[in-house]
Image: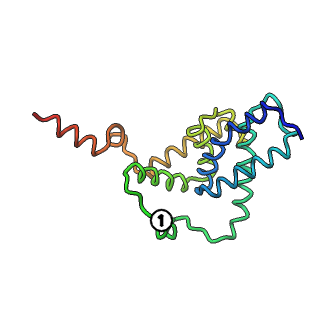
Amino acid sequence: MTIENSTKEEMLSAIPHLRAFAISLSGSVDRADDLVQSALLKALSNLDKFQPGTSMQAWLFTILRNDFLTQARRRRREVEDPEGSWAEKVAVMPAQGARLDFDDMLKALSKLPVDQREALLLVSAEGLSYEDTARICGTNIGTIKSRINRARSRLAELLKFDPDNDLGPDRLVKAALFMHAEP
């Protein structure tokens, strides 16, 4: 099978985005790499089904998402750790505040329903349009907008986000500013 250079380039340029999406869906770098590899292999073996003129990235995202959902259905019989109690016992807590904030965000994201999480990540993290996201998720734009709105509201609730205190400089920056502001 001969693949055009433009198709190769489109697939290669999508890999970092696929990987980021897979990590956010699965919560595991190793599992994400497996998902990306599987999606690319499926895409290559079904390249004849790709419709020229449409978004290669959106098509690859759809394949990856469908593969993830299939695997999730299979794993339902496995022991789950939704609270992360087992994972907390084996994890080493990071020393940096930004890393802690990032971990908090990942935990909060993992508590969102998959449909809300994927819509939010495709639009917010990957920068895809609502139209492409709706196509990937197999639904309409209104549903995507609703999912994103609910996901953002739930994240704010889970992270105990207070717009009056949480926007702008963090505690350390504020303390430094106030300390240097006095003569």
- Identify the colour scheme used: rainbow
> 10 or 116, which is in the foreground?
10
Q: Residue at image x 73%, y 34%?
A: 10
The x and y percentages for residue 156 are 45, 47
**The C terminus sits in image quarter:** top left
Residue that sits furthest to the left in the current view: 183
Q: How many marks?
A: 1
Q: Residue at image x 82%, y 30%?
A: 52
Where 70 falls versus 171 (above or below)?
A: below
Q: In this figure, which residue is indicated by the disc labeled 1?
A: 91
Where 51 falls versus 155 (above or below)?
A: above
Identity, as a three-letter code, of the amino acid under mark 1: Ala
The x and y percentages for residue 182 are 12, 35
Q: Secondary structure at mark 1?
A: loop
Res 120 → quadrant: top right
> 135 or 174, which is in the foreground?
174
- Lateral position of residue 85 relative to residue 162, left or right: right
Q: Residue at image x 68%, y 36%?
A: 13
The x and y percentages for residue 94 are 41, 58
**The N terminus sits in image quarter:** top right
The x and y percentages for residue 56 are 75, 35
> 149 or 120, which is in the foreground?
120
- Lateral position of residue 32 relative to residue 163, left or right: right
- Lateral position of residue 167 relative to residue 73, left or right: left
Where 119 falls versus 80 (above or below)?
A: above
Residue that sits furthest to the top in the current view: 53
- Lateral position of residue 62 relative to residue 107, left or right: right
Res 169 → quadrant: top left
Q: Residue at image x 35%, y 42%?
A: 166
Q: Are there few (<14), some (14-19), or many (20+) residues within 10 Å of tag 1?
A: few
